[in-house]
Amino acid sequence: MQRDYLSLSREELLAEKESLQKKYEEYKAMSLSLNMTRGIPCREQVDLSEDMLHVIDSGDKCISGKTDIRNYGMLDGIPEMKQIFADLLHTLPENVICGGNSSLNMMYDTIARAMIFGTAPGFTPWGKQKEIKFLCPVPGYDRHFAITEIFGIQMIPIDTTDSGPDMDQVREYVENDPTVKGIWCVPKYSNPSGIVYSNDTVRAFAALKPAAKDFRIFWDNAYAVHDLYDEVKVLDIFAECRKRGVENRVYEFASTSKISYPGSGVACLVADDEDILWAKKLIAFQTIGPDKINQKRHAAFFKDANGIIEHMKKHAEILRPKFEAVVDTLEAELGDLGICQFTKPRGGYFISFDLLVGSARHALNLTHDAGVSMTPAGSTFPYHNDPYDRNIRIAPTFPSVADLKTAATLFSICVRLAAVERLLGLN
């Protein structure tokens, strides 16, 4: 059993540094080239949807109701796909807009519409208001932060607990500052922490009394069906809002990007009646309709929501050993050294890793120089500014199990080396 690094003398730390440096050089000599920068499905996962490419082999199968989907029309998507998303997300088809492959694009467009036209008729566009702010639970999703930043929206970090965002902080900002217009949320298997919002957290969101009448919750349900073990359910945010008469508070997003094909999936926006009508009115100026043939392929392949649930069990069989390989390696290499902590998610796509304050950038530089690419330090915070320089996002989905064990061992050596040097005052 290795000793807690915090209890080692300077002489012992120097000896440990020398030993670790030798191990590090051995790995560096291997000329590794492994990519763990993003949550990318592996080839085996993508292959699961191979038959989707063949479910439509004639024009006769390109009919939805009485509409030939090869032509114009159906601005909000084909009925079959709207029904599948409605069943998965516990809503009604009329509250769903199906789009292209990217929910990120739908989030971007939703922000853009609010900036240019307002969140609803009669509301001043965000872009014409003097100052607007967004709450950003941290660590969080870098692409959420990128969207907010490009529109010049001020981002406010919110601490995250084991049950979701710190709702005391959220409540303080939302209910007292009319310039706070929204909050990013990943309610199930949050990126990167993997936490699941508790029932109390969801109810607290619904119970908010925003100072801004055009406040919106951006509910990015990216991992709604991405369980690695038993199914985990999150309380329905719309149902809780409906109890309080505030249905128009939430925009929900989801997609099949990590279900079928990341580059050729189907995304959706879910909102209450008035918000959907407003979005459809504005989208009509933007497009003549989504790729309905691709939506038909998805609907024909999955058939219904249960088809997606069963399909995701196959994904879990592929991904579960990968997550376990990383977690087991980290526990074996780092578990009793007192220099880090990391999540052990039950689903989703990431592991959140915290090491000694001031060590993340150095550990990742070492890892990168030895041939393993990971998400840059600071990415899980607004403006790429982790004030403690300690959080790292680990993405285990793309490499093989064998490569993950190698990468996790190397990463552990780099974490230990960065910690030793930090404790010695060398970085």
Image: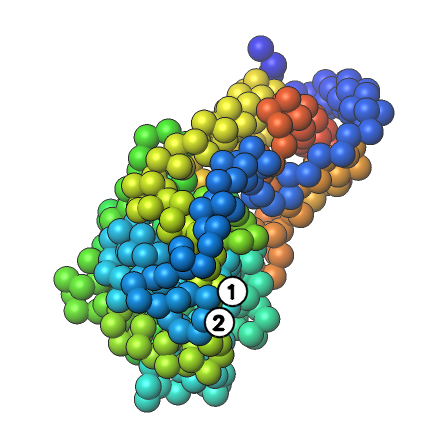
Secondary structure type for disc 1: helix
Q: Residue at x 25, y 72 (%)?
A: 273
Q: Amino acid at mark 1?
A: Asn
Residue 129 location (% of width, % of height): 46, 85
Visible residue check, residue 412:
no
Position of 356 with respect to 86 (left or right) is: right
Q: Between marks 1 and 2, how big is the CA–CA gap?
A: 6 Å
Q: Amino acid at mark 2?
A: Asp
Mark seen at residue 109: 2
Secondary structure type for disc 2: helix
Q: Which residue lies most toward the left here?
A: 243
Mark seen at residue 371: none
Place residue 370 in its image quadrant.
Answer: top right
Q: Are marks 1 and 2 in contact (CB under 8 Å)?
A: yes
Q: Residue at x 40, y 57 (%)?
A: 60
Mark seen at residue 105: 1
**Quarter of the rendering occupied by the C terminus:** top right
Q: Residue at x 59, y 30 (%)?
A: 339
Visible residue check, residue 36:
yes
- Mark 2 surroundings: few (<14), some (14-19) or many (≥20) residues within 10 A: some
399 to 269, vertically: above or below: above
- Mark 1 surroundings: few (<14), some (14-19) or many (≥20) residues within 10 A: some
Residue 399 location (% of width, % of height): 63, 32
| Nearest the eye: 339 or 151 | 151
Residue 25 location (% of width, % of height): 83, 24
